[in-house]
Image: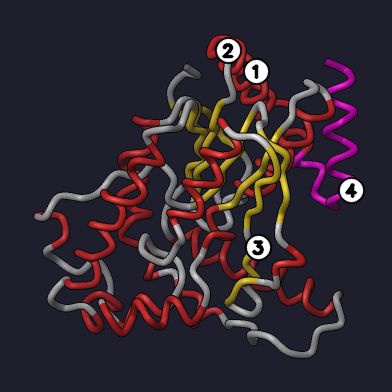
Amino acid sequence: MEAVRELIEKFARERDVSGEFVQTANDWYLEALALITARHREAGRPILVGISGCQGSGKSTLAELLFALLEEHSGYKVALLALDDFYLGREDRADRARKLHRLFATRGVPGTHDTAWMSRSINDLLTGTGDVVTPVFDKSRDDRTGSERWHHYGAPVDVVLLEGWCLGIPAQSEADLRSPCNELEASQDPGGEWRGHVNRFLAADYQPLFDRLDLLLLLQAPNFDAVAQWRFEQEQHLARQQTKRGETTGRALMDEQQIKDFVQYFERLTLHGFEELPKRANLAWQLGADRTVSGRLGRAS
C-alpha cells in the first residue's frame, strides 16, 4: 500500500495537481483500483472500464491516475482512450449539419463522434493483435490533430480505460424529448428534430458500446450549475496550454457567457445522466462544487 501512495504522490507532482487530489485518491479512488484488478481476475480476459462524468468533473485525471497505477503498480498493459478524441473532424460535422440539423456542427452530443472507429479500436485492443491506432482531437482548434500525434497501442491489452462525459447514459423516451430543456433547444430546435437525432444516435451507435463495459465508474456532479464553472476552468487551462506551446493561432478563449451557451448542448443528457447513472454505475462518487468527493453513491460491485 505504501508503494501505491508513493505513486499517487509522484503522479500529483508530475501533473501539478493539488494536495487535495492526493487525499481524495487515497481516501476514495484506490477502491477503483481494487475493483478493476478483481474484475480482471474474475473475468480471466481483457476488460473494458468506463469512467463517466460531466465536463470538468476530473474524469480525465482519474483515468490517467488509474492508467499509471495499473501499469506501474499492478503490472498491467493498459490503453487509455477518451471519447473526446473520437470527435468527428470539423468538415465531417459540417456535413452532418447539412444533412441532419445545423446544431451538429458543434461537437459534443451523440452523433458528433466516430463511433465506428471507436468501437473497432476497442474491439481490436481487447481481442486483436498488433498495432492499434487511435486519433487525437485538439479542442483548441476544434479539429483532429495530424496523424503524427495519434496514439499507438500494442494489442491485446489487459485493460481498456475509456473516459467520456456521456458514457453509460441511456436513450430517453419519446415523451421526454417533447419539451425543450433550455433556451438553445427552444430557439434552435423548437420541433425537437435535433434532439430526436441525438437520441437515436445514442440508442443505435453508443448503447452497444456501453453494453460491453465490464465496469462503469462515475463522478457525479452536485448540479448542472457546476458544469459551466468547471467547463470555464477547462477553457482557461486550454488557453494556458496553448500559450505554453507558443501557439498564436487556434480557437479564441470563450468567455463565461459563451461557456454557458456552449454547455446547453450537453444539458439534456447531463441531467438525464444525473438520474440514471448512479443506478447503473458499479462505483459512483458524489462530488462537491470544489470537485472533492463528499461520499459514495451506493456500494462498489
Q: Nearer the viewer, mark 1 or mark 2?
A: 2
Helix, strand or loop for disc 4: helix
Distance from disc 1 to disc 2, alpha carbons, whole Å, reads: 11 Å
Disc 1 versus disc 4: nearer the observer: 1
Q: Earlier in the sequence, mark 3 or mark 2?
A: 2
* Type of amino acid at the residue the image marks with label 4: Glu
Q: Label 2 near label 4: C-beta < 8 Å?
A: no
| Residue type, numbered disc 1 | Thr
Residue 68: x percent and y percent? 78, 35
Q: Is residue 1 visible?
A: yes
Establish if 75 lies above or below 239.
above
Q: Which residue is mark 4?
A: 14
Please identify the residue farthest to the bottom as the structure is shown.
Answer: 248
Kindly identify which numbered label has been placed on residue 37.
1
User: At numbered mark 2, what does the secondary structure look like: helix, strand or loop?
Assistant: loop
**Where residue 293 appears, x then y in whole percent?**
60, 37
- How far apart, in angstroms, are the residues tagged by discs 1 and 3? 28 Å
Task: Indicate which disc, 1 or 3, sits on the residue closer to the N terminus.
Answer: 1
Taking the spot 57% from the left edge, 39% from the top edge, the residue there is 124
Number of callouts: 4
- C-alpha span from label 4 to label 2: 33 Å
Q: Earlier in the sequence, mark 3 or mark 4?
A: 4
Magenta segment boundaries in residue numbering: 1-21
Relative to 108, residue 98 above or below? below
Q: Quadrant of residue 150?
A: bottom right
Prevalent SS, magenta region = helix
Q: Are marks 3 and 4 in contact (CB under 8 Å)?
A: no
Quadrant occupied by the N terminus: top right
Judge whether residue 34 is colored magenta: no
Q: What's the mark number on residue 44?
A: 2
